[in-house]
Image (cartoon, rainbow, N blue to C red):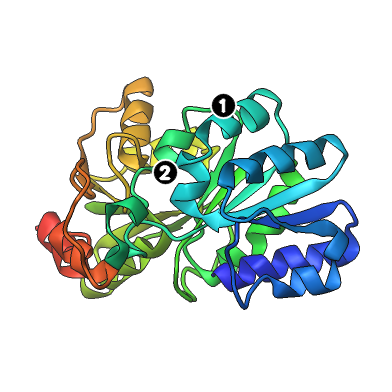
């Protein structure tokens, strides 16, 4: 999915002279084409992510539409003050492209586990948040963000997932009946789809855009199901589980939302792949099935 998004930015640069691409020494064998074809609209700030935001803000003041690219948690946590002041307060329409979600960098330990990024960012008003779940969603997210002309963060999972075949902000894949609803985003949607294959009564609600959210439609969908499980590779207290709990309380909906997510602790164990942590926290297909039962 990262390739689809990067290619979309590159294609936009060919037709829009205001698009500018910046990286914090990330994207070897991926971003060189920007430097070669658009040397005047490419900047590698080095391993200096805070400068990445500051330089982007200056470019935005000059009329450019900057895209920044680095590892997701470095983009958000290392740059939080700069994002708050330069993007949040000044409303610069900068697009933060973050590579990796959840335990994509499992073997690198808790400093590289991306399980608390967008929950921190949602404290800053006015920044849209995307996490595409498939290639169709990733392929259209750049055009969608540019059209909306707002600041945005794109949390890019690793993988080349063909389904769901939709670029909509939200996709409902109904099962047979209204018993169980799984709600998810990003790469974990694939595990939810595998659960649906094994249990046709399960419905899956997919978010490709986490903010803004069509609250009226989401509340209506949730209210129709007996059991609702929120599956995410993010701390639930600041992630989608928390967002949806606030939503149903605000809409006076009496419904229990069951969270399937990492425990709210930084795990010092090192897994060789995301599967290690998915099994540990019940995020794999078998764990979700057990939660449903």
Q: Earlier in the sequence, mark 2 or mark 1?
A: 2
**Viewer-side label of 2, 1:** 2
| Residue 149 visible | yes
* Residue 288: percent from left, percent from top: 18, 60
- Quick one: 79 or 103, which is closer to the camera? 79
The C terminus lies in which quarter of the figure? Answer: bottom left
- Quick one: 150 or 102, which is closer to the camera? 102
The residue drawn where x is 34% and y is 35% is 238
Compared with residue 228, is residue 80 higher up or lower down, i.e. above or below? Answer: above
* Residue 160: percent from left, percent from top: 48, 76
* Residue 227: percent from left, percent from top: 20, 46
Compared with residue 226, is residue 40 higher up or lower down, i.e. above or below? Answer: below
The residue drawn where x is 44% and y is 61% is 100
* Residue 211: percent from left, percent from top: 52, 39
- Quick one: 189 or 3, which is closer to the camera? 3
Element at label 1: loop
Name the disc covering residue 117, or none: 2
Element at label 2: helix
- Count the numbered circles shown: 2
The residue drawn where x is 48% and y is 49% is 74
The N terminus lies in which quarter of the figure? Answer: bottom right
Q: Marks 2 and 1, how far apart in space?
A: 15 Å
Is 287 left or right of 216, judged from the image as shown? left
The residue drawn where x is 21% and y is 74% is 198
Is 275 left or right of 280, judged from the image as shown? right
Name the disc covering residue 73, or none: none
- Quick one: 249 or 61, which is closer to the camera? 61
Compared with residue 30, is residue 57 higher up or lower down, i.e. above or below? Answer: above
Q: Residues within 10 Å of mark 2 (few under 14, many from 20)?
A: many
Check disc 1 and report the residue beneath it: 125
**Quarter of the rendering containing residue 254:** top left
């Amino acid at each position: 999915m990262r390739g689809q998004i990067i290619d979309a930015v590159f294609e936009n640069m060919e037709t829009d002279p205001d698009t500018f691409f910046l990286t914090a020494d990330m994207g070897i064998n991926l971003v060189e084409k920007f430097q070669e074809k658009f040397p005047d609209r490419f900047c590698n700030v080095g391993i200096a992510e805070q400068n990445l935001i500051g330089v982007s803000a200056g470019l935005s003041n000059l009329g450019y539409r900057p895209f920044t690219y680095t590892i997701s948690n470095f983009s958000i946590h290392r740059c939080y003050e700069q994002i708050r002041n330069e993007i949040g307060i000044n409303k610069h329409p900068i697009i933060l492209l973050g590579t990796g979600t959840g335990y994509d960098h499992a073997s690198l330990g808790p400093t590289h586990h991306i399980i608390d990024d967008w929950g921190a960012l949602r404290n800053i008003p006015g920044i849209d948040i995307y996490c595409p779940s498939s290639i169709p969603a990733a392929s259209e997210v750049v055009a969608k963000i540019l059209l909306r002309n707002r600041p945005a963060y794109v949390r890019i999972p690793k993988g080349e997932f063909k389904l769901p075949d939709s670029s909509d902000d939200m996709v409902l894949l109904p099962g047979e009946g209204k018993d169980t609803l799984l709600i998810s985003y990003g790469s974990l949607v694939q595990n939810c789809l595998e659960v649906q294959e094994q249990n046709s009564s399960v419905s899956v609600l997919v978010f490709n855009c986490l903010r803004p959210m069509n609250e009226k439609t989401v509340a209506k969908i949730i209210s129709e199901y007996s059991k609702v499980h929120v599956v995410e590779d993010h701390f639930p207290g600041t992630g989608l589980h928390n967002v949806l709990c606030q939503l149903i309380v605000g809409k006076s909906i009496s419904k229990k939302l069951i969270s399937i997510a990492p425990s709210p602790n930084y795990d010092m164990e090192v897994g060789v792949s995301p599967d290690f942590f998915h099994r540990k926290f019940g995020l794999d297909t078998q764990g979700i099935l057990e939660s449903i039962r």
